[in-house]
Amino acid sequence: ATWKERKSKYLQGLEHDSVEALMVCAADKIHNIQSMIDDHAVQGDSFWEKFNAPNDEKLWFYIEVNRILGERLKNPITKLLNEKMEEFKEVLG
């Protein structure tokens, strides 16, 4: 399966996952986004070259995760995820 197909399947799963699984997902995505922001600060734009998907597709995926979690998860962690998403968008340009 392609990167986008795998990510689409992941997003479909989020539509039905438990609250506990959504919490783990939110924490994981916050960590992943922060790691990418930090690594980009050190390595510059060459950092993005190691990924299998272009930046616009990475952004699409994280926006969709954020949307689903915002709709399904009534927890303050979604505010932190939103904040990290805004930072991520700035880094991607």
Image (spheres, rainbow, N blue to C red):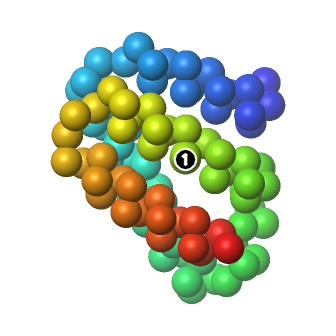
For the point 74% across and 36% down, which residue is it?
A: 3
For the point 74% across and 34% down, which residue is it?
A: 4
Q: Which of 42 and 37 is in front in this view?
A: 37
Quick one: which residue is furthest to the top in this view?
16
In which quarter of the view is residue 69 placed?
A: top left
Secondary element at tag 1:
helix
Q: Return the x and y of residue 49 as percentages of the image width and height.
A: 78, 66
Quick one: which residue is furthest to the front in this view?
71
Whether 21 is drawn above or below 91: the answer is above
| Horizontal side of residue 48 vs 86, given as left or right | right
Whether 45 is drawn above or below 53: the answer is below
For the point 55% across and 27% down, which residue is it?
A: 11
Residue 36 visible somewhere in the drawing: no
Q: Return the x and y of residue 86 as percentages of the image width and height.
A: 47, 65
Looking at the rendering, in which quadrant would you find the C terminus? bottom right
Looking at the rendering, in which quadrant would you find the N terminus? top right
Q: Return the x and y of residue 17 as percentages of the image width and height.
A: 37, 18
In which quarter of the view is residue 56 placed?
A: bottom right
Q: Return the x and y of residue 70 as percentages of the image width and height.
A: 36, 38
| Horizontal side of residue 3 vs 84, given as left or right | right
Whether 46 is drawn above or below 13: the answer is below
| Horizontal side of residue 73 vs 47, given as left or right | left
For the point 30% across and 57% down, which residue is it?
A: 80
Amino acid bearing label 1: Tyr
> Dot 1, how many residues are within 10 Å of its Cα: few (below 14), some (14-19), or many (20+)?
many
Residue 67 visible somewhere in the drawing: yes
In which quarter of the view is residue 68 placed?
A: top left
Query: Residue under circle 1?
Result: 62
All told, the count of numbered labels is 1
